[in-house]
């Protein structure tokens, strides 16, 4: 305590890290944190009402990805959904010991697969090219009769690059292999339709789409083999034990309903804002480049490297103006290593260290983008004159 409170408007461009809870979502959640505290498993009407409302939320979550409500299992977060999916798949094929994933997955999949590798599984981590794209021929080559599961993210959290999930699923059909996709960054930002995607399982997370933190869902296609990861009571029809996080489930349902309602408009709105931010920054700052392919990309995300500057320094300077973003360099990403995604793409060291991810949401507007466009180029220019990389460069 004791620091001076700054009355400064926050310009929040870090929505792939987490999003603001939508006011409509909060409003729906609040009664479940006060008067409707019944346990949905109870026999009495008081609990039964809560049960019905959970089922209503399940239908809304299902609708966002065009699933049947019975195919939705509520979990505690995207990480739990990812761990559950991979674990369930390897347990479904006990004689198989091979897992295929990519080098650019979120740690929720990557580190879980590394954990399984230490337990004796053989894991193939597929590389990506310098635009963050998968080599589909290589995927075909590494598939074998021992492969139990393929887990490939729908969209990358750092670059926004979208993978060809439909194509991969088609490649796997006719084979006895589970296919899981981590759609935590995609759901609510681009159309995700499980009737068109040949996936067995798909992960989503509430806090990436304006619901609360601590709620996620795993889609499990009807008829797919599934083994629960969290074992205990009979909640979620025996597929995920633990008394439900009622308020967050209700809010998640509302958030999915809003996302679905606004999807087409937001795709257009966000890509316009993002493109303006991106193109103006590229014009005003020399030695700046976009990381990742731009054609198949989330509409809200841009990852820009400002060469010869430290990403941390950029973030700290932007923070003085209330601008929030993320960097691919070590300290600010909460790990000891610089971005594994950008390293896998072969982005040069100096560019990784100068990378900044901007991720937008429906709550951003033109005036905020104008502010960033005005403030950032002089910051880059100033930092470059101080740069340890010795490139005292300029920004227009
Ligand atoms: N998968 C991806 C692609 C993510 O971006 C994240 C969070 O950043 C997760 C999984 C983990 O989700 P959660 O924070 O809900 O555990």
Image: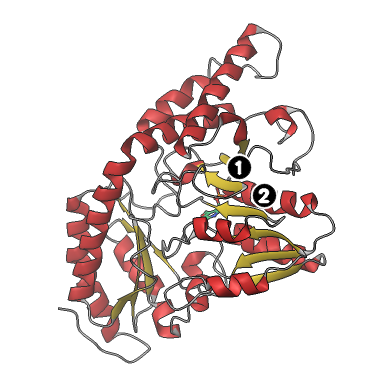
Residue 131 seen anywhere in this rendered image of the structure? yes
Query: Looking at the image, which is closer to me, 325 or 193?
Result: 193
Residue located 18% across and 74% down the image: 283
Question: Which residue in the protein does label 1 denote?
Answer: 218
Query: Residue 336: where, in percent of width, then height?
Result: 57, 72
Marking on residue 85: 2
Left or right side of 362 for 229: right
Q: Locate the C terminus by quadrant.
A: bottom left
Query: Residue 99: where, in percent of width, then height?
Result: 71, 64
Residue located 42% across and 40% down the image: 210
Asked if the residues shown at circle 2 and circle 1 are in contact, with their CB atoms under 8 angstroms apart, the answer is yes
Is 107 above or below relative to 312? above
Q: Residue furthest front?
A: 174
Query: Looking at the image, which is closer to me, 98 or 82?
Result: 98
Query: Residue 37: where, in percent of width, then height?
Result: 59, 18
Marking on residue 186: none
Left or right side of 354 for 9: left
Of the image marks 2 and 1, the number of the one nearer the N terminus = 2
Q: Label 1: state its secondary structure.
A: strand
Q: Label 2: state its secondary structure.
A: helix
Q: Residue furthest left?
A: 396
Query: Looking at the image, which is closer to me, 80 or 64?
Result: 64
Query: Residue 233: where, in percent of width, then height?
Result: 77, 29
Instruction: Give neighbour class at mark 1: few <14, some 14-19, many 20+ (Cα, 10 Å).
Output: many
Distance between the alpha carbons at the discs numbered 2 and 1? 8 Å
Query: Looking at the image, which is closer to me, 312 or 211?
Result: 211
């Amino acid at each position: 305590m004791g620091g001076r409170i700054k009355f400064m408007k926050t310009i929040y461009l870090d929505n792939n890290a987490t999003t603001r809870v939508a006011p409509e979502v909060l409003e729906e959640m609040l009664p479940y944190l006060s008067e409707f505290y019944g346990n949905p498993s109870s026999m009495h009407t008081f609990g039964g009402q809560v049960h019905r409302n959970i089922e209503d939320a399940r239908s809304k979550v299902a609708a966002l990805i065009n699933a049947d409500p019975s195919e939705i299992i509520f979990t505690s977060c995207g990480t739990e959904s990812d761990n559950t999916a991979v674990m369930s798949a390897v347990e479904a094929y006990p004689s198989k010991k091979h897992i295929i994933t990519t080098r650019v997955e979120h740690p929720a999949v990557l580190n879980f697969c590394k954990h399984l590798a230490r337990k004796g599984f053989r894991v193939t981590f597929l590389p990506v090219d310098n635009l963050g794209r998968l080599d589909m021929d290589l995927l075909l080559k590494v598939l074998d009769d021992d492969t139990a599961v393929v887990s490939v993210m729908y969209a990358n959290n750092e670059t926004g690059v979208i993978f060809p999930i439909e194509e991969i699923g088609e490649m796997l059909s006719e084979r006895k292999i589970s296919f899981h996709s981590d759609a935590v960054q995609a759901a609510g930002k681009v159309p995700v339709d499980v009737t068109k995607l040949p996936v067995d399982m798909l992960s989503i997370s509430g806090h990436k789409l304006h619901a609360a933190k601590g709620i996620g869902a795993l889609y499990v296609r009807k008829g797919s083999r599934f083994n629960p990861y969290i074992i205990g009571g009979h909640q979620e029809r025996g597929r995920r034990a633990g008394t439900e996080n009622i308020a967050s489930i209700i809010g998640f349902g509302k958030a999915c309903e809003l996302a679905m309602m606004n999807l087409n408009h937001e795709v257009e709105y966000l890509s316009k804002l993002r493109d303006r931010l991106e193109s103006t920054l590229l014009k005003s700052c020399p030695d700046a480049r976009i990381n990742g392919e731009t054609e198949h990309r989330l509409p809200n995300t841009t990852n820009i490297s400002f060469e010869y500057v430290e990403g941390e320094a950029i973030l700290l300077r932007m923070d003085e103006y209330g601008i929030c973003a993320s960097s691919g360099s070590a300290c600010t990403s909460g790990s000891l290593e610089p971005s594994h995604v950008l390293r896998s793409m072969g982005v040069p060291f100096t560019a990784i260290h100068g990378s900044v991810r901007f991720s937008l949401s429906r709550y951003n507007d033109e005036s905020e983008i104008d502010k960033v466009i005005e403030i950032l180029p002089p910051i880059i220019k100033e930092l470059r004159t101080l740069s340890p990389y010795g490139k005292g460069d300029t920004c227009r």
